[in-house]
Amino acid sequence: MAKKICLEKGTGFIMAPALIKKKVFVILLLLVVSVISSGCFAVKAGTSLDLGHSPGLDCVPGEKGAVMMFGDTFVRHVGNEEVTITGISLVNPEEITLAEAVLVELGDKESLVGFGEWPPTDEIFPLPAEWENRVEAAGTVLEPGAELNLIVALQSNADDTASAQSLAITYENAAGKAFEQKTLVSYFITSRTCEEIIDENHDY
């Protein structure tokens, strides 16, 4: 039996069946990549975490290269199923990078860790009793009802002012569905005064 060949419509050249199969496979592979990159598997907005309800602006003095602590975010898991934090990232960062993000449990009478240099010491304010047992935020499993202090260490790469619009927390449930929530607080590290930064950023 003679080998069949096929003229692919509109191409102007003859293609053997084996080459057609390879081309179909490549097209299918490109379609898969296109679906992923187009956001068909986009992360959904979540509601399981209570990150506070009041917009705010955090400002800490610091020169270029300084790594400063922002520890005023209290995370409450108000959902009804276990979730795993998969990442912490900065939203719209300007000359600022995330150096570290940790979670720590607070006692009944303990306050949020607050602000200062990273890593913190208890010379000015006492650290939580569970500070040595803090965990990296990414990978932490949160059970319903969990309440933790989220502390991030941010590094300024700016000669003047480094900033980020907020923090984004991504997490997954047991079924592997991904969600994201953002804090309502913006973050600034400046070599100027924080009063100037507050005056210049009324929109935050």
Image (tube, rainbow, N blue to C red):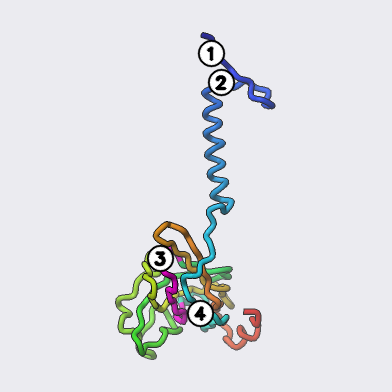
Residue tagged by mark 3?
83
Between the residue at mark 1 and the residue at mark 3, the CA separation in whole angstroms equals 57 Å
Between the residue at mark 4 and the residue at mark 1, the CA separation in whole angstroms equals 70 Å
In the rendered view of the protein, which quadrant contains the C terminus? bottom right
Q: Are marks 1 and 3 in contact (CB under 8 Å)?
A: no
The kind of residue tagged 4 is: Gly
Frontmost of labels 2 and 3 is 3
Residue 3: mark in rendering: 1
Among the two numbered marks 1 and 3 on one chain, the one whose residue lies closer to the N terminus? 1
| Front residue of this view, candidates 115 and 67 | 115
Magenta range? 68-87
| Front residue of this view, candidates 73 and 61 | 73
Residue in the picture at 36% in, 77% down:
104
The kind of residue tagged 1 is: Lys
Among the two numbered marks 3 and 4 on one chain, the one whose residue lies closer to the N terminus? 4
Q: Quadrant of residue 76?
A: bottom left
